[in-house]
């Protein structure tokens, strides 16, 4: 930090270290420095990684709506940014926005229709929203691609039971 005092990643790392040590006040200050540094970086160039890091920092600082906006920008710039998508999906769920979490996952299965993991993730999102019939279809799509996935078979069974289709 002596050579690059506004290094956003360095401040983010320091914030994480302080947090692990239980030094909350110092972690908060380092987090705020990292936020300012990422915000400054993004004024001159946009990249998904910086938006994703900023979203993570906003979330850690309790700024949930700012975190959602930053992660939405990260995933718009790079739809395959896995960590940003996962974090955004979680924040949507915590914010009581299951339809947004589902839409985010649907966009992934549209982009990767032969990816069993994406279909299974869609099934999970639908099941969490009590949309079990749709979840069943997503799980079945996943299993057509990867028939040996035991976790997906279990999830399918739970969804079938939820709609009283135990015989299947």
Image (cartoon, helix red, strand yellow):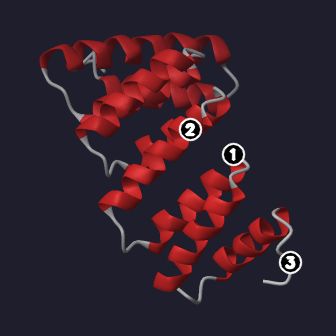
Task: State the image quarter where residue 150 is shown.
Answer: bottom right
Q: Are marks 1 and 2 in contact (CB under 8 Å)?
A: yes
Most foreground residue, 69 or 40: 69
Cα distance in 3D space between marks 1 and 3: 20 Å
Helix, strand or loop at disc 2? helix
Instruction: State the residue at coordinates (57%, 33%).
Output: 92
Q: Is residue 149 shown above or below 90? A: below
Numbered tag placed on residue 159 in the rendering: none
Helix, strand or loop at disc 3? loop
Crowd around label 2: few <14 · some 14–19 · many ≥20 (10 Å): some
Residue 124 drawn at (x, y percent): 64, 58
Most foreground residue, 88 or 114: 114
Cα distance in 3D space between marks 3 and 2: 27 Å
Residue 163 drawn at (x, y percent): 81, 63
Residue 3 seen: no
1 or 2: tag closer to the N-terminus:
2
Circle 3 residue: 166
- Which residue extends farthest bottom? 148
Would you say 64 lies left or right of 69 here? Answer: right
Numbered tag placed on residue 99 in the rendering: 2
Would you say 20 lies left or right of 42 here? Answer: right
Circle 1 residue: 129
1 or 3: tag closer to the N-terminus:
1
Q: Is residue 158 shown above or below 51? A: below
Residue 37 drawn at (x, y percent): 31, 15
Q: Is residue 68 shown above or below 106? A: above
């Amino acid at each position: 930090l002596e050579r690059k005092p506004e290094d956003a990643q360095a401040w983010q790392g320091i914030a994480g270290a302080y947090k692990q040590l239980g030094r909350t006040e110092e972690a908060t200050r380092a987090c705020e420095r990292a936020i300012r540094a990422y915000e400054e970086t993004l004024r001159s160039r946009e990249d998904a990684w910086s938006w994703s890091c900023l979203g993570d920092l906003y979330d850690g600082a309790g700024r949930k709506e700012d975190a959602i906006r930053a992660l939405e920008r990260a995933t718009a710039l790079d739809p395959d940014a896995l960590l940003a998508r996962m974090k955004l999906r979680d924040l949507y769920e915590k914010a009581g926005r299951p339809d947004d979490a589902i839409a985010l996952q649907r966009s992934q299965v549209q982009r990767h229709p032969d990816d069993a993991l994406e279909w299974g993730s869609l099934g999970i999102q639908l099941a969490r929203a009590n949309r079990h019939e749709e979840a069943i279809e997503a799980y079945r799509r996943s299993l057509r691609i990867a028939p040996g996935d035991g976790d997906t078979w279990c999830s399918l069974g739970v969804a079938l039971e939820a709609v009283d289709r135990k015989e299947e």
